[in-house]
Amino acid sequence: SEEVDRMANFKGHALPGSFFLVFGLWWSVKYPLHYLSREVNKKSHRTSSFQRVDAIEGGVKIFFSLVGMLAEQFVPDGPHLHLYSGDKRDWVKLMNWQHTTMYLFYGLSGVVDVLTYISQAVPRGLDRLMLAMAVFVEGCLFYYHVLHRPLLDQHIHSLLLIAIFAGAGSILLEVFLRDNIVLEMFRASMAIVQGTWFWQVGVVLFQPWGGPMWDENDHSNIMFLTMCFFWHWAAAVAILAVNYTLTYCCLQRFRRVSGEPYISLGVRQQKCESRSQAAFLNGSDEE
């Protein structure tokens, strides 16, 4: 029935949206923790614990991708691995196949994450390059996903492309600018925006909980959704700010209890050292 189809299409958007949202929220905590930990001891490189976290993250990425591919292929009305129907001489459920292809590349990204941890033979930065490639493939698939479809459908998906290609560009920069907290936080924000906007797309186009469908020819709906997209972006920035602040406060409290140096003390110490050096040099000049 039509209601069943609408719910199925909604789930097809909610599932990847949930995956992106989980990763975006996780990155919004992981990278501040990594950055603030490095600030205390700048001489130490990435610890083995954070490298293990990257490997586990890759495993989770593989798992999510497998779940997504199986869901797209083996739902009751899915293609069940049939790409072309010989009887009808037609393609079979290409929308599901496009989603499957998207999950495939994210799964490959997870494999590279794990290999990067296991073997030192993997070139540095290849994990970021593979992730950038996966996001770029997602963007290309969605660009051609909505061609010749109703205007509202095209517009709401084109807004999603902003987050996708912006994220792909920032991740590509991470290949060359490793451990850059600004790029990492930007990537987290784009993942959060993708996650929440996937849900928004599903709600607008398919109305899973009933109610009147959106008027696809009303320009006011286009204007509202454009504005709404940037509200999602603002919410993502707010989430990053809150998580960064909470991570900083929790880390400071932990160090206070354990007796480790604070980040702020390290900054003050550097200032004191620079002042001492300046005073010493001035004294030498006077002599």
Image (spheres, helix red, strand yellow):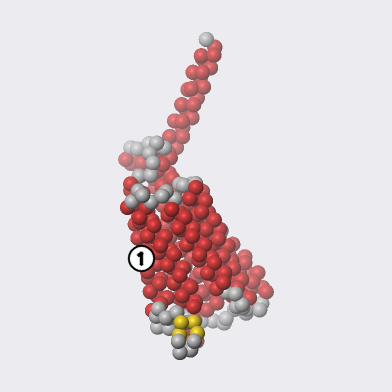
The residue depicted at 61 percent of the width and 77 percent of the height is: 148
Residue 38 higher or lower than 4, as above or below: above
Residue 248 shows up from this direction: no
Q: Residue at x 42, y 75 (%)?
A: 72
For the image shown, how many numbered marks are present on the structure?
Answer: 1
The answer to whether residue 158 of the structure is visible from this angle is: yes
* 216 relative position to 280: left or right: right
Name the spot of residue 231 as percent of width and height, x first: 57, 62
Residue 224 or 182: which is nearer the viewer?
182
- Which residue occupies the extreme top position in the image? 287
Residue visible at 45% across and 58% down?
A: 130
Helix, strand or loop at label 1? It is helix
- The outermost residue toward the right is 219
Q: Is residue 218 left or right of residue 109?
A: right
Q: Amino acid at mark 1?
A: Phe
Nearest the eye: 34 or 81: 81
Q: Disc 1 marks which residue?
A: 63
Residue at point 42%, 67% (across, down): 104
Q: Residues within 10 Å of mark 1 (few under 14, many from 20)?
A: some
Among the 4 quarters of the image, the one containing residue 232:
bottom right
Picture coordinates of residue 128, whole percent (x, y): 45, 54
Residue 238 point in image, percent of width and height:
52, 56
Q: Which of the 4 quarters of the picture holds residue 163?
A: bottom right
Image position, residue 138 (x, y; %)? 50, 66
